[in-house]
Image (cartoon, rainbow, N blue to C red):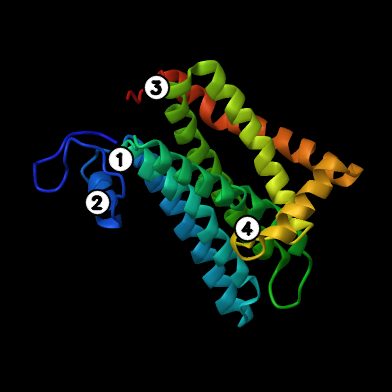
Amino acid sequence: MFGRGDGVFLSTEPSPLPSSFQLITKIMLKEYPYKSQGLVLILSTLLSIGIYLVRVEHANQFYFAFLIWNLFLAWIPYVISTAIVVFKVQKRWIMWAAFCLWLLFLPNSPYIITDYFHLKPRSAAPFWLDLTLISSFAWTGLLLGLASLQQMQEYMFHRMGKAVSWLGTLALLFLCSFGVYLGRFERWNSWDLMTRPDALLQNIAELILHPDKHTLGFTLAFGAFLVVAYLAFALRELKANKYQYTS
């Protein structure tokens, strides 16, 4: 996002298609103001993987391997929002493409919370170990989603204003909740929009036009939870930073 650089490859012009090498280098050169936050997220991810490996060693089975995949998906929106922030995307079509891709994968971050559905006593491992394992992955996934949304809100603020950025953020949180419902109860994946778009869109239309109490109840309740979590996570920092990113 920022124009500083030594002239080797960090130009003052925003990069429309940043490479992963550029992204990592800019972050390591401290051009990324969320560097400390990113390091905490990496540590939390490593802790989750470490707990999983302890369970694998103890139980001699890979039952919860799906948590690794789910956490990988949870990282995708964070990586996208980080790229947008670091490289200050200006071209409108690139921004909208990145935003749509980000929104498509955003529900994967809080989705891991619903993996508590898999929690039950098992003879292979102590119950407390499975509880800690799922909690660690769920916590990390939620943090990734909230941190990513915080980045996007600051980006929106400088282009649309404070009111629109907050209204948009609240709407995104409830859209995210609906996305979690689609994944957990309707069993859709993010990439189904590309592989099975007709069936997915038809299902979404049916749920919107003829919502039942479960769809509406989950979307509102889980959405409210995400709103409170986001306020607890981001409000103080947003005020402290005074929306520091400028275009």
For label 4, the residue is 193
Percent coordinates x, y for residue 54 in the rendering: 54, 71
Residues at discs 1 and 2 in contact (Cβ within 8 Å)? yes
Q: Is residue 109 visible?
A: yes
12 or 234: which is nearer to us?
Answer: 12
Marks 1 and 4 close (CB-CB < 8 Å): no
**Residue type at the position of mark 4:** Leu
Which mark is first along the chain, 4 or 1?
1
- The secondary element bearing badge 3 is classed as helix
Q: Is residue 129 left or right of residue 146?
A: right
- Report how far apart the C-alphas of labels 1 and 2 lie in the structure: 9 Å
Look at label 1 and name its amino acid: Phe
The local crowd at label 1, few if under 14, some if 14 to 19, many if 20 or more residues have their Cα within 10 Å, is many
Callout 4: 10 Å neighbours few (<14), some, many (20+)? some
Q: Are marks 3 and 1 in contact (CB under 8 Å)?
A: no
Disc 3 to disc 4, C-alpha distance: 36 Å
In three-dimensional space, the C-alpha distance between marks 1 and 4, rounded to whole angstroms, equals 27 Å
Residue 176 location, quadrant:
top right
**Left or right of residue 82: residue 209:** right
Front-lying residue, 8 or 218: 8
Please name the residue shown 83% across and 49% down the image: 206
Of badges 2 and 3, nearer the viewer stands 2
Give the Cα distance between marks 2 and 3. 25 Å
Most foreground residue, 10 or 118: 10
